[in-house]
Amino acid sequence: MTQTLSLRRPDDMHLHLRDGAILQGILPETTRHFARAIIMPNLVPPVVTAAEATAYRDRILAALPEGAAFEPLMTLYLTEETDPDDVATAAASGLVKAVKLYPAGATTNSASGVRDFDKVRAVLDRMAEIGLPLCVHGEVTTASVDIFDREAVFIDTVLDPLRRRTPGLRVVMEHITTRDGVAYARAQGDDLAATITTHHLIINRNHILVGGIKPHYYCLPVAKREEHRLALRAAATSGEARFFLGTDSAPHVDALKEHACGCAGCFTATNTLPLLAHVFEEEGRLDRLEGFTSLHGAAFYRLPLTEARLTLEKRDAPFTPPAKIHTGAGPVTVFDPGFSVFWHVRD
Ligand code: DOR
Ligand code: ZN
């Protein structure tokens, strides 16, 4: 008998859609399976104001495939010039569901991010008042800190002091990659949550570096040692409401990934759900997949649960996604887990 699993239609609580031809090309990969997604604002130039978020949302809606039922949940990119009133108005209207903090220089298109945290104090205070979540890219950018330590150092030297200075601020630790991140999240109250990507449940740093450098496994925060991957798998499959899916699916065309200075990002929108079913089955926790993909994130963001459903089906034949998605901007390579996956999303 075919094994099936029915879920409320998932939410991707951390997604990069980009703009223009690449947006048009990759958007169906998300809308095929997901009901909603928290859309990252790190365009060039970034999405800073409510007016820019409205315009970006309209471009996403215009690019939707025929008949797709998909709601983009917009975010604003926090800069040292962000106006607290603009943020509050955008939140009150329902347009914006979160503000994104990139430490300046931490990752792709983060040059306009925050250098001096005192300069964003008023915005953070206002967000705490109105309950608007701050999504945090949790890595320090200090040149002397080893890239594999940047998340743990950020938690101690930036995140924890920032949360103490702004009590009540609701925070999402985005794409945690370490057992330190898991442990910190677990020790906090319900004003803190953490997203976990699909790829960080599958790869460790050896996948990037052993046997030749694999640019399609390079992302930020970079994958860490195996012990950290195991901690992430335990957290994702724990059933704890503070952990939920944010794929960080981050398309870059192959020419920019397979490059002397390759861009960070794994593109997982196409195969995330089959991969997660595989991982949760390996952990003996298929019963907790729906919480991770469809319940916990909605609860944290105070959104109604999705009503539509999606069925996963385990078949004898493997699910083989296209190796690349061909966009008007060029091909984008789909994340290859390096093993066969037998879970399919039923059409
Ligand atoms: O790998 C990543 N890619 N990490 C990020 O934080 C940004 C993202 C992107 O925009 O490409
Ligand atoms: Zn991201």
Image (cartoon, rainbow, N blue to C red):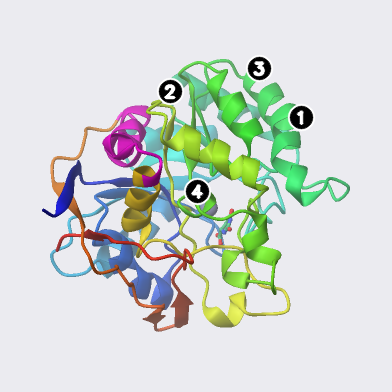
Q: Earlier in the sequence, mark 1 or mark 3?
A: 1
Q: Is the magenta stretch mostly helix, strand or loop?
A: helix
Which label sits in the foreground, 2 or 4? Answer: 4
15, 289: nearer the viewer: 289
Magenta-drawn stretch contains 294: yes
> Which label belongs to residue 164?
3
Looking at the rendered structure, the secondary structure element under dot 4 is helix
Q: Give the range drawn in magenta.
A: 282-302
Which label sits in the foreground, 3 or 2? Answer: 3
Residue 343 pos. (x, y %) = 27, 58
> Which label belongs to residue 142?
none
Looking at the rendered structure, the secondary structure element under dot 2 is helix
Looking at the rendered structure, the secondary structure element under dot 3 is helix
The residue wearing badge 2 is 130
> Which label belongs to residue 157?
1
3, 22: nearer the viewer: 3
Residue 264 in view, yes or no: yes
Q: How crowded is mark 2: few (under 14 residues within 10 Å), some or many (20 or more)?
A: some
State the image quarter where residue 218 is shown.
Answer: bottom right
Which label sits in the foreground, 1 or 3? Answer: 1
The residue wearing badge 4 is 201
State the image quarter where residue 301 is shown.
Answer: top left
Q: Earlier in the sequence, mark 2 or mark 1?
A: 2
In contact (CB < 8 Å): disc 1 and disc 3: no
Query: Spatial distance from mark 3 to mark 2, Cα to Cα?
Result: 17 Å
Look at the picture and state if 330 lies above or below 133: below
Looking at the rendered structure, the secondary structure element under dot 1 is helix
